[in-house]
Image (cartoon, grey):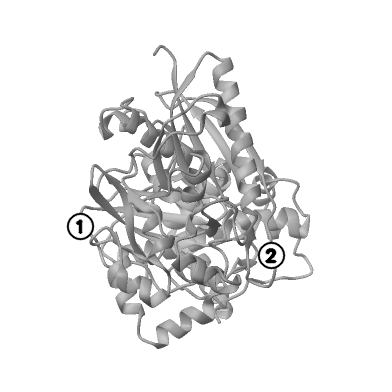
């Protein structure tokens, strides 16, 4: 084929996107569509599954049309998705029985506390690498089938299907013929044993989740079926699936033990490749599946920050002090310092390494001279401070990071990238293709389709856009971190 292309569906927390890549990792088409966030109560976050489906379908059709207009033919499709978000649907009709409960949602915090008091957390961590927290899928899934009348009985009878967003999209894309997920998404549910590579019967019992609900688990590059011909005019193979942070690791070509990347989207997620041997964290980081290819698992340590780009979205939608994310760079750079203003963006609790679901956001150091610019700078700085805490935890677990590859929408901001390098005191590398999450899904689809023969071919396609190195002295770094930790201490519940 003279002009093959790979289509990546990137279904995120606030929008759905579809991007067509050439095999050489060049973008030939990109479409994006936001969808509403639903906040029924404090700390609750939901999505309408039909909005997810419609925006996914629309953006995929548009990207496909744009690629074909340039003479490209899509030979394989990859999916990457917001992780931990879970939903349940009717196997016959394909209709969801409840809104999707989003990874940010904290409604099951009390249930997690009860399970912890019953002594289950050690087992959960040993089997899954995860902590007992409402962030993960299992308690959300149990909530749905208990909340919807009759759902538990129907689940036991095999009338309902459940899964993370990738599973729902595969079901819809294949016309309900495939109920599948991949190992990375499965590893985020608290139901999947990352040591044995199976849904764990004991964990299913702990969380009271019927096994009949769950999909089959496959490698990240595998045969996930074909799209129904009526959707795109022909049946396209679905060849790759990975949760968004693992997909970004693949897009950043983090294939060597010790490689580290950090993605700055709605949240921020640092992943460190730990190789084929699982590392158990003593610093409350997560052990997880980095990727699984040809039956071989590569593990990772992960630090999860719940609010990164969401803080900028709050500046735009909640406070109205910026019109778009691009406004924050000149606002932050126009100040000589933060003048003692610190934002702790615990809007839906705090993730690693604190894991405090009851913490709520706060801003400190306000004076009569505080202006919108201070809020913008504090929001950007908060992302770097949280990343600093994660790297400190990685070092405590035996890691020695000297370089960080960054990606996601926020890293288009040069001021933020420089502040990250200053605060972390490591080199920060930004790739030429910043859509690394989608690129990772495309790479997986290409591996499955035979477009690439191995990981070395992917590494050859990674290109550096810009490197940032620290320009901050250690005294200033210590002073800033002390101010952050003081604000953080006052916020923890």
Q: Name the side, left or right, on which 60 lies relative to 281.
A: right
Q: Which residue: 55% across, 21% down?
A: 67
Q: Which residue is mark 2?
A: 39
Q: Secondary structure at mark 2?
A: loop
Along the viewing direction, whichever of 493 and 177 lies nearer the viewer: 177
Q: If the image is split into quadrants, where does the N terminus sit?
A: top left
Sequence order check, earlier mark of 2 and 1: 2
Q: If the image is split into quadrants, where does the C terminus sit?
A: bottom right
In the depicted structure, whether residue 43 falls above or below residue 229: below
Q: Residues within 10 Å of mark 2 (few under 14, many from 20)?
A: few
In the depicted structure, whether residue 290 falls above or below residue 121: above
Q: Position of residue 293 (x, y in %)?
A: 27, 43
In the depicted structure, whether residue 249 falls above or below residue 201: above
Query: Visible in this render: residue 282?
Result: no
**Residue at the far bottom in the pictured view:** 117
Q: Position of residue 482 (x, y in %)?
A: 50, 71
Q: Which residue: 51% across, 39% down?
A: 173
In the depicted structure, whether residue 62 falls above or below residue 12: above
Along the viewing direction, whichever of 373 and 158 lies nearer the viewer: 158
Q: Residues within 10 Å of mark 1 (few under 14, many from 20)?
A: few
Q: Position of residue 220 (x, y in %)?
A: 34, 44
Q: Name the side, left or right, on which 380 lies relative to 403.
A: right
Q: Which residue: 41% across, 68% down?
A: 210
Q: Position of residue 249 (x, y in %)?
A: 38, 45
Along the viewing direction, whichever of 309 and 278 lies nearer the viewer: 278
Q: Quadrant of residue 195?
A: bottom left
What label sits on residue 277 in the rendered view? 1
Front label number (2 vs 1): 2
Q: Which residue: 45% across, 43% down?
A: 177
Along the viewing direction, whichever of 29 and 187 lies nearer the viewer: 187
Q: Name the side, left or right, on which 134 lies relative to 280.
A: right
Cα separation, mark 2 vs mark 1, equals 40 Å
């Amino acid at each position: 084929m003279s002009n093959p292309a790979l289509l990546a569906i990137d279904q995120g927390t606030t929008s759905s996107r579809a991007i067509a890549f050439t095999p050489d990792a060049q973008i030939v088409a990109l479409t994006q569509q936001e969808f509403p966030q639903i906040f029924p109560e404090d700390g609750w976050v939901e999505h309408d599954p039909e909005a997810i489906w419609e925006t996914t379908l629309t953006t995929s059709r548009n990207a496909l049309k744009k690629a074909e207009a340039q003479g490209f033919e899509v030979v394989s499709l990859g999916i990457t998705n917001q992780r931990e978000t879970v939903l349940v649907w009717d196997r016959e009709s394909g209709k969801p029985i409840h809104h999707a409960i989003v990874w940010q949602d904290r409604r099951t915090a009390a249930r997690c506390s009860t399970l912890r008091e019953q002594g289950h957390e050690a087992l959960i961590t040993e089997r899954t690498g995860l902590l007992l927290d409402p962030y993960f899928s299992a308690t959300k899934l149990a909530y749905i089938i208990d909340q919807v009348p009759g759902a538990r009985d129907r689940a036991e009878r095999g009338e309902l299907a459940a899964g993370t967003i990738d599973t729902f999209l595969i079901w819809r894309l294949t016309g309900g013929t495939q109920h599948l997920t991949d190992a990375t998404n499965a590893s985020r549910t608290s139901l999947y044993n990352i040591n044995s590579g199976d849904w764990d019967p004991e964990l299913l019992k702990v969380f009271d989740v019927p096994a009949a609900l769950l999909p089959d688990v496959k490698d990240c590059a595998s045969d996930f079926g074909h799209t129904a011909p009526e959707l795109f005019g022909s049946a396209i193979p679905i060849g790759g699936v990975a949760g968004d942070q693992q997909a970004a690791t693949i897009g950043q070509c983090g294939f060597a033990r010790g490689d580290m990347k950090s993605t700055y989207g709605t949240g921020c997620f640092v992943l460190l490749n730990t190789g084929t041997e699982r590392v158990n964290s003593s610093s409350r980081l997560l052990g997880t599946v980095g990727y699984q290819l040809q039956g071989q698992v590569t593990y990772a340590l992960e630090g999860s920050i719940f609010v990164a780009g969401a803080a900028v979205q709050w500046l735009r939608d909640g406070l109205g002090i910026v019109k778009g994310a691009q406004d924050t760079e000149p606002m932050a750079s126009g100040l000589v310092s933060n003048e003692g203003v610190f934002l702790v963006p615990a809007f839906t609790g705090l993730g690693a390494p604190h894991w405090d679901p009851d913490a709520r956001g706060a801003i400190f150091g306000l004076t009569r001279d505080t202006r919108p610019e201070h809020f913008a700078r504090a929001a950007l700085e908060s992302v770097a401070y949280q990343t600093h805490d994660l790297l400190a935890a990685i070092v405590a677990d035996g890691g020695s990071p000297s370089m960080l590859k960054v990606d996601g929408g926020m890293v288009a901001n040069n001021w933020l990238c420089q502040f990250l390098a200053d605060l972390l005191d490591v080199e920060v590398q930004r790739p030429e293709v910043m859509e690394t999450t989608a690129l990772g899904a495309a790479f997986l689809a290409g591996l499955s389709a035979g477009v690439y023969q191995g990981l070395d071919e992917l590494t050859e396609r990674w290109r550096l856009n810009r490197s940032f190195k620290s320009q901050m002295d250690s005294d200033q770094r210590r002073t800033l971190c002390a101010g952050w930790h003081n604000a953080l201490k006052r916020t923890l519940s």
